[in-house]
Image (cartoon, grey):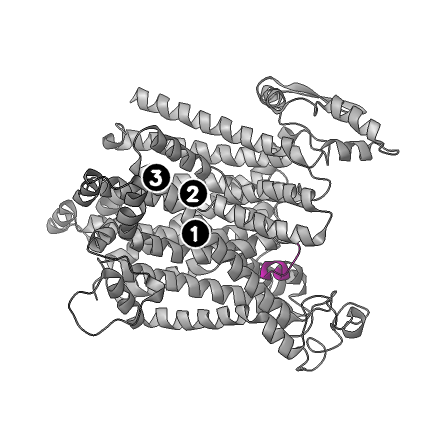
Amino acid sequence: MTSAGTEALEARSDINPSTEPPAPKDIAGRSPTRIALARLAKDKVAVVCGLVLLLLVLAGLFAPVICNALNIYKDYSPGAPRASDVLDFDSYPLVGPPYYPFTWDHPLGVEPNTGYDNLALLLYGLRTSLFIAVLATVVSTVVGVTLGLVAGYAKGWVDSLLSFFIDFMLSFPFILGALALAPIITTRFGGNSETLGRAEFLSLVGVLVLFGWMGLARLVRGQVLSLREREFVQAAQVIGVPTRRILFKELLPNLVAPIVVSLSLALPAYVAAEAGLSFLGIGLSEGTSLGKTIASARGYYDTYPLYLWVPVGTIMVLVIALNLLGDSVRDAFDPKTRR
Amino acid sequence: MLGFVVRRLLSSLIVLLLASFVVFAVFYLGPSNPARPVCEGAGGRCTPERLVAIEKQMGLDKPVLSAYGEFMGGIVKGREIDFGASAYDCTAPCLGVSYDTRNFVTDELKERIVPTILLAIGGSIVFLVVGVTTGILAASRRGSSTDRLLVSGSLLVSSIPYYLLCLIAWIFLTLQTNIFPATGYFPITENPLKTIGGLLLPSLVLGFATAPAYARYTRGQMVETLGDDFVRTASAKGLPRRRVLFRHALRAAIVPIVTIFGLDFGALLAGTIFTEAIFSIDGIGRWGLEALDSPLDLPVITATVLVGATFIVVSNLVVDIAYGFLDPRVRIG
């Protein structure tokens, strides 16, 4: 992304951006990360997106609490209404939309065919989406950064091998890869619905990571290739600092900006990918997912529009907010942007 | 130059061989048994003894390397495929026999690839025209409100998940308002007009969803080129603005865009699964998705993944070699 970004970070930037206090007013001695955060706080789009995201994250985080308080259920757990109580013979709901007036028992209505509560499905779906996306982002960042660091720092055959592996993985079509792995998981764990759910969850994160780490690895490798020749690394080598320390204490702090940027752009991509794969039926088939809800709600666009458009709108808002925030983060961390 | 081409060809071949082996091995060693649907479909009870016999007949008891060799041999020179009761003489290039339809995968592939190619061409026309024009427009009025509107608009469009865009377009434009004809693939040999009608909306959605990336890229390239000396010279000698933009600046800026287009086109040929699934177009992507329904159609999945990877690798190769011809600096690397 920005080679100049890392150069600007040269001075000192081992500060963790998440625990950063609000930028102080004084001009002297601000680290580039601080400057970026101060820029971000002034960006109206970023602030609005951040607030929207905070709301959605809280909704997902407290899904069980909210569902308990409202007494709504996403499955047939004890206490949930039976399907025959809330559904008509034609499988459309007996309470709430589309044919009956609004009720506080089911603020967004109930799902046709199953009788689950739509709000509960939405909250738990949000939880699943965010959980999977965050997990995949963290793991793929760790993998990408580590492999990129190693490939860039170790010359010779290690670099050639890793670079070949990166190119090899990039030549696999992502969705086709997911398509190929889905049946294997389903056949292996198909017997038990609980283990199937867990296996699908892990394999989904695995697929996202498997096809998601290469971009960052390439980027980090390129940066390390040039950083490796700098004086501070040579100095560390000369005084006998162990390689692992050079990699993670000397080189890594210089890569904060590209890593943060790639992280913030990976997150929306993973949210969209999770819902998309579940929509195609090759993501989660057990458990709750917004993509799965959209797939089953497709046919109801005419008769029960609320059932379809609420999850569609939620994913859209979530992904757009994440994307716009990611774009603002990129601008904020780019020293070439002047404001 | 020849050395560069040969080296690039060889490395692509290695990537393809490795990719095909990984795909093949994942299925071959995977938990699902291709003999089971054959055994159950043959009529009568599927006893364990019969299952083992069919496995042996299908060659599933062989070690993975020799089975892979046989599969690759089939692609090169054809092979015999035994399916319990019935045997198939599969001529080269043989990708196996579908468990579901019992047709040759190669034959079905030839049919299925037509809509995917048409869709890729249709989508490309739209995103090249829309994206490049928008990019030129934004770059030529850099800093103006038009520029800002185009840039933020393209950011917003590219932020929306693609499949939701497809879904919304499909529901609003064909199902509820009938603005566009019903989507799908109708054989081009029967009624070309109907074919175009069925692929019109999918191509437009695909094009408009991909266009922002091209707009941003074109804008960046054009802004750079417009600052160059030869553009200033062209303007200074009194050429009309349009001529400067299209004849002089665009020509210099278009090369990297062609590169990206080459890669994207390869990826489109690998199957636009969401587009095909939502608009019910019987292309490669939807074929692969359908093969997941039970009974699992392993030869079809293997073939779609393989063909997809081949398209991506080949497009990479073509772009690299073309670039080597266009830009002498690349040849050394």
The chain to which mark 2 is attached is: B
Residue at mark 3: A150
Label 1 residue SS: helix
The chain to which mark 3 is attached is: A
Q: Residue at 44% across / 41% down in the picture?
A: B265
Give the amino acid type for the residue marked by disc 3 in the picture: Val
What's the magenta region? A285-294
Q: Which disc number belongs to residue B264?
A: 2
Q: Position of residue A10 (x, y in %)?
A: 21, 53
Q: Is residue B240 magenta?
A: no
Q: Is residue A277 above or below residue A29?
A: above
Q: Nearer the viewer, residue A79 or B7?
A: A79
Q: Position of residue B8 (x, y in %)?
A: 37, 26
Of the two numbered discs 1 and 2 on the same chain, state the one appearing first in sequence.
1
Q: Are marks 1 and 2 in contact (CB under 8 Å)?
A: yes
Q: Nearer the viewer, residue B31 or A173?
A: B31
Give the amino acid type for the residue marked by disc 2 in the picture: Asp
Q: How far apart in space, not on screen, are marks 1 and 2 (Cα)?
A: 10 Å
